[in-house]
Image: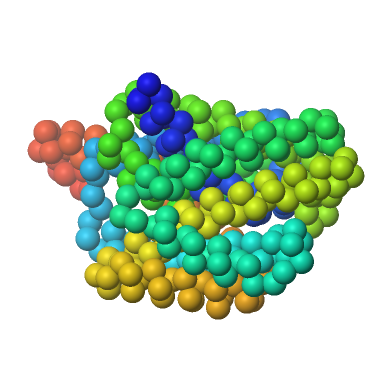
Amino acid sequence: MKSVKKVFCTAALFVGSVVGAGFATGQEVSLFFGKDGVWGLFLSALFMAVCAFAFLQAGARGRHLPPRVKTVADAVVSLCSFAVYAAMIAAAEEVLFGLTGQRGLAVFLAVGMVFLSGERTEALSALNLLAVPMMTAIVVLVGARAGKGVSGGFHPIAALCYGGMNLLFSGALLMKEGENATFRERVGASLVSGAVIFLMLYFMRRCVTDGGDMPFLIAAHKDGLGKVAQISLLLAIVTTMASCAFLSIDGLTRLSGDRIFAAGVVTVCGILISGFGFARIVKTTYPVVSYLGLALSLFVLAAPALAFLKKRGAQSGIPIDKPPPHTI
C-alpha cells in the first residue's frame, strides 16, 4: 500500500508541475497540437513518461554533474522556475478577479507558496495528490461534453518541444523524488504520469478546435461549465506555482545559505514581476524555457549511454574522446 501511494504521489507531483495556466486555458495545446491528431498527443505523453523515468533514475543513482555544469544547470532551472512562478501569479490574479471581483488576491496565494517550500517535497506531493485528480476529472468532463473529434496531421518536433517545455523544472523535482523511490515505484510513477498526461491532452485537444486565446474556457462556457473550468485553471496555476516557488527558493538558498531570506526575495520579486502580465511573461520566457527543457531532457536521456561508453573505454584502455592509435 505504501508503494502504491508513492507511485501516485510521484506521478501527481510530475503532472501537477507540468500542467499550468497555459495548459488549463487550452493555449498550449492549441499552439502545439491545434492541427494534429492523436499521434502527436501520444508521442508527447510518451516522451514525457520516458523522461520522467530517466529523471527518477538519475536521482536514484545519485548522478552528479561536473561542478561547473551543475552550477549552470542549477542557475538555469532556478531562473526559469522563477519566470514561470511570476507568470502563475499573474495568471492567478486574472482568474481570482474573474471568480470574486476582487483585485490583489494572488498576492496572498503567492505568499502561501512559502509554506510548501520546505527542504523536501512531501507538502508538494500532498497538494498535487489532491489537485491533479480534480483537474483531470474536469478536463475529461468538459472535453467529453463540449469537445469535438480529434483529427489532423502529425508534427513530432512540436510534440517533443511541448514535452521539453514542461520538463525543465519538473525534472528537477523528480530527481529529488527518485532518491527515495524503488525501481518498481519509478516505473509505476512514469507509466501513470504518461497515461494521465495523454488523457488530459486528448480531452483538452477536443476543446481547442475553434482556437481563441482561452479555447478551453470558451468551450466550457458554451456548455455551462465555465465556473468548473475556472476552478480547474486555478488548481493548475496553484500546483505549478508551488513547484516553481519550491525550485526558485531552493536555488537561491544554495546561493545565500538562508532559506527564509531566499523565500522572501523570491516571493517579493515574483509579485513585482507578475505586474508585467501573464501574456507578456509567457511570450518572453516560455520559448526559452521550452528549448532549455528539451536540451536538459535529452542530456538526461543520453547520460546512461555516455556512462556506459566511458566505462567500456576505461576497461579497454582507450579513452572515448580520442581515436585509437593508427596501426599499419
Q: Quadrant of the image for the N terminus?
A: top left
Compared to 24, does 56 lie above or below? Answer: above
Q: Residue 208's x, y, as percent?
A: 79, 44
> Residue 206: percent from the left, percent from the top?
78, 36
Residue displayed at 34% across by 64% down = 251
The colour style of the image is rainbow
Residue placed furthest toward the right: 222
Q: Nearer the viewer, residue 320 or 54?
A: 54
**Residue 273 drawn above or below residue 72:** below
Q: Specify the quadrant that holds the C terminus.
A: top left
Query: Taking 110 as reference, is 55 above or below it?
Result: above
- Nearest the camera: 222 or 285? 222
Q: Nearer the viewer, residue 131 or 154?
A: 131
Q: Left or right? Give the position of 76 relative to 164.
A: left
Q: Position of residue 227 (x, y in %)?
A: 78, 48
Most foreground residue, 285 or 109: 109
Disc count in the image?
0
**Residue 195 appears in which quarter of the rendering?**
top right
- Where residue 188 appears, as percent x and y from the top left, is 42, 25
Q: Can residue 264 be seen? A: yes
Residue at coordinates 71% horizontally, 33% vertically from top-left? Answer: 140
Tell me the residue at 43%/62% (across/down): 114
Above or below 315: residue 250:
below
- Name the residue located 50 percent from the left edge and 43 percent from the top edge: 128
Q: Is residue 283 visible?
A: no
The answer to whether residue 95 is left or right of residue 288 is: right
The image quarter containing residue 97 is bottom right
Task: Please state if 32 lies on the left or on the right of 226 as rendered.
Answer: left
